[in-house]
Image (cartoon, helix red, strand yellow):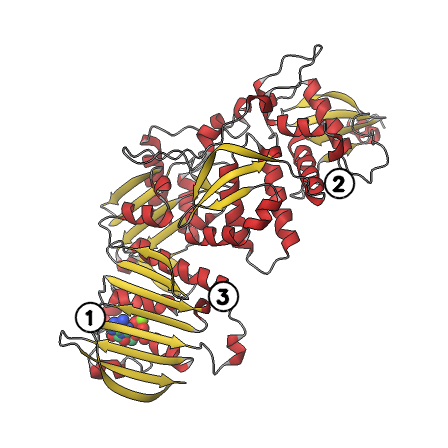
């Protein structure tokens, strides 16, 4: 409903739109605009089904310039709410007010008002209890509404948007001259600093792609920051999505998504936007042409920018530990004259030094990633309490060597045991975190300089609701005004990793798993994510001492055969299988 009503205001040429909600919209949705308004006759007509002012001749159907055209929204909304429409199409300060209940006009009168329209829907579905039951929790519905406003606001920087919830301002966006200013206001200034503007035309195919694209280091764990619009309409289309990921290929790690706000302009007869009116999908006449145009445009822009490095170079073993200067999407704001906010915690040097051992080989850079957990290993209380003495299975194995910088080869009696080092380490990290969390003994480490996180509305909302859970885990996150948060302390386990990025990921995860989940489940997800952030990766050379340390740590946790993501940690090859391979049996 919010989407339909905001679209109507945009179609009416408004440059000021106010969205007011109560109880997530359940109690009240009110949208006011300063658009063209309606006279008395049109005001009544607008409530009729299939009445629209947006099509005057048949050809209009094939060249839609407006967001609406079906003429159904007002009629539908008025039939399921206590509805009020006020509109004025002149400058004489006199408008019409119509009150509707359950689809029936109850009252109509003149009211004093400025040019524009105000539409109010109270007690949604009051007459359809079965539908009302399907409304979500207040915060969830509010999130959806804020999403709608966010998307429209990105497409229309020239319109000022305000969103109030229970009288409190949630979004306040003034009129802007450019997309960049709107992105900065909506998604954060620091984020804008890491984006490039793009404007490409394909004269032959009559297509234009323009907007802002994030540099690869600015990435997210979900595709929620890929905002795409076709001819001004927000869409979430598979072909478009794929073409964007294709444009970023080799630049992003698996499972990471870029931040983009992109507008595709294409001749109206080359795209059908009516395939799924609610699902945001479209059908292109020449699908592959569009796909290739988008990905080529992105590639070209990304290539020409000086900061691009191939992803594999970035993740070379020596840098497997997230490099704070590189990976974070929240580097210092760079615009001159702005207050520089450092978002990176300084790393106490002790956290990256190996425990000194005379006989061991000199510590190497690759060891750094293993470090925090190796240190944990030396803390006896981090071992599961109910473990009767230390198991010696993994440490008792004969270590043969490392294969492909990813697998440890070990011999167990006659069998060959392959161990996925990344999965193993994730398992260890996860079990340890779970254990220390269970015992509420997460040791916290304060950051010398708090990291400032700028989030979008929904992430901020999700984070806000879980500040206490995060505190239990050892994160001290505090509101820092608006949608910003200050990260002041992190679990000691994670010192030296990119915790700012981790919190952003956690917020996204919390946002997407929704609200129904049990707290436990959420914490578990967070622990998995934390474990994932703190571990050694595949493709990292381990020397025998490091490999043995890993095996020993495997004995220290309540072992489960899979990594927390469900991938197996070990694979056993029996001697007989190997003999069969060589036809010795
Ligand atoms: P549609 O947008 O598909 O035409 P709606 O039911 O949403 O159908 O609206 C019906 C008509 O009411 C519109 O065609 C338009 O003429 C008028 N209308 C609706 N909202 C507004 C508004 N905010 N300002 C001016 N006119 C409006
Ligand atoms: Mg409409």
Sequence-first disc among 3 and 2? 3
Task: Give the vertical position of 86 relative to 264 (above or below).
Answer: below
Quadrant of the image where one finds ligand 1: bottom left
* Front residue of 362 and 22: 22
Q: What element does badge 2 sit on?
A: loop
Displayed quadrant of residue 277: bottom left
| Mark 1 residue's CB less than 8 Å from ligand 1 | yes
Q: Residue at x 71, y 29 (%)?
A: 377
**Mark 2 or 1, closer to the camera:** 1
Residue 55 rendering spot, x and y as whole percentages: 24, 73
* Front residue of 11 and 265: 11
Q: Distance between the residues labelled 1 and 3?
A: 32 Å
Q: Distance between the residues labelled 3 and 2?
A: 39 Å
Q: In the image, 455: left or right of 584?
A: left
Q: Which residue is drawn at 70% across and 37% down?
A: 432
Q: Residue at x 54, y 74 (%)?
A: 133
Q: In the image, 25: left or right of 414?
A: left
Q: Name the residue under label 1.
A: 36
Sequence-first disc among 2 and 1? 1
Q: Are marks 2 and 1 in contact (CB under 8 Å)?
A: no
- Residue 138: image tag: 3
Task: Give the vertical position of 411 relative to 441 (above or below).
Answer: above
């Amino acid at each position: 409903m919010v989407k339909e009503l905001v679209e109507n205001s945009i179609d009416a040429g408004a440059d000021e739109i106010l969205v007011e909600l109560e109880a997530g919209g359940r109690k009240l949705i009110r949208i006011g605009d300063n658009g063209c308004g309606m006279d008395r006759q049109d005001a009544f007509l607008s409530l009729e089904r299939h009445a629209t002012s947006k099509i005057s001749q048949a050809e209009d159907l094939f060249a839609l310039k407006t967001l609406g055209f079906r003429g159904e929204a007002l009629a539908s909304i008025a039939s399921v709410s206590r509805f009020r429409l006020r509109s004025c199409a002149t400058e004489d300060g006199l408008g019409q007010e119509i009150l509707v209940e359950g689809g029936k006009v109850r009252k109509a009168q003149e009211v004093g008002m400025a040019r524009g329209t105000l539409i109010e829907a109270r007690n949604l579905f009051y007459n359809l209890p079965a539908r009302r039951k399907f409304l979500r929790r207040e915060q969830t519905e509010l999130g959806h509404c804020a999403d709608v406003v966010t998307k429209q606001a990105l497409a229309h920087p020239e319109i000022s948007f305000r969103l109030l919830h229970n009288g409190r301002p949630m979004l306040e966006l003034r009129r802007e001259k450019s997309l960049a200013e709107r992105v900065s206001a909506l998604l954060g200034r620091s984020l804008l600093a890491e984006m490039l503007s793009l404007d490409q035309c394909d004269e032959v195919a009559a297509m234009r792609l323009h907007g802002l694209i994030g540099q690869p280091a600015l990435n997210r764990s979900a595709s929620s920051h890929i905002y795409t619009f076709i001819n001004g309409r927000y869409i979430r289309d598979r072909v478009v999505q794929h073409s964007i990921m294709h444009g970023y290929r080799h630049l992003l790690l698996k499972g990471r998504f870029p931040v983009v706000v992109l507008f595709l302009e294409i001749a109206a007869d080359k795209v059908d936007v009516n395939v799924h009116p609610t699902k945001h999908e479209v059908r292109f006449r020449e699908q592959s042409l569009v796909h290739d145009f988008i990905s080529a445009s992105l590639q070209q822009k990304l290539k020409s920018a000086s900061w691009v490095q191939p992803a594999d170079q970035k993740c070379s073993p020596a840098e497997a530990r997230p490099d704070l200067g590189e990976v974070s999407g929240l580097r210092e704001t760079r615009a001159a004259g702005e207050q520089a906010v450092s978002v990176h915690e300084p790393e106490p040097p002790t956290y990256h030094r190996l425990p000194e051992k005379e006989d061991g080989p000199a510590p190497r850079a690759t060891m750094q990633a293993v470090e925090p957990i190796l240190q944990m290993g030396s803390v006896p209380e981090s071992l599961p309490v109910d473990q009767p003495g230390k198991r010696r299975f993994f440490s008792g194995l004969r270590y043969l060597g490392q294969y492909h910088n990813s697998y440890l080869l070990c011999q167990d009696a006659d069998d060959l045991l392959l161990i996925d080092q990344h999965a193993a380490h994730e398992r260890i990290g996860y079990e340890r975190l779970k254990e220390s969390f269970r015992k509420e003994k997460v040791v916290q480490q304060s950051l010398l300089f708090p990291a400032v996180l700028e989030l979008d509305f929904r992430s901020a909302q999700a984070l806000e609701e879980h500040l206490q859970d995060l505190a239990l885990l050892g994160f001290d996150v505090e509101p820092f005004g608006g949608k910003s948060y200050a990260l002041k302390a992190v679990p000691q386990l994670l010192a030296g990793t990119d915790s700012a990025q981790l919190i952003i990921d956690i917020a996204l995860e919390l946002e997407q798993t929704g609200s129904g989940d049990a707290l436990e489940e959420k914490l578990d997800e967070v622990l998995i994510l934390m474990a994932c952030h703190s571990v050694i990766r595949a493709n990292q050379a381990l020397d025998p001492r490091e490999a043995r340390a890993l095996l020993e740590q495997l004995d220290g946790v309540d072992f489960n055969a899979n990594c927390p993501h469900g991938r197996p940690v070990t694979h056993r090859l029996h001697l007989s299988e190997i003999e069969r391979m060589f036809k010795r049996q």
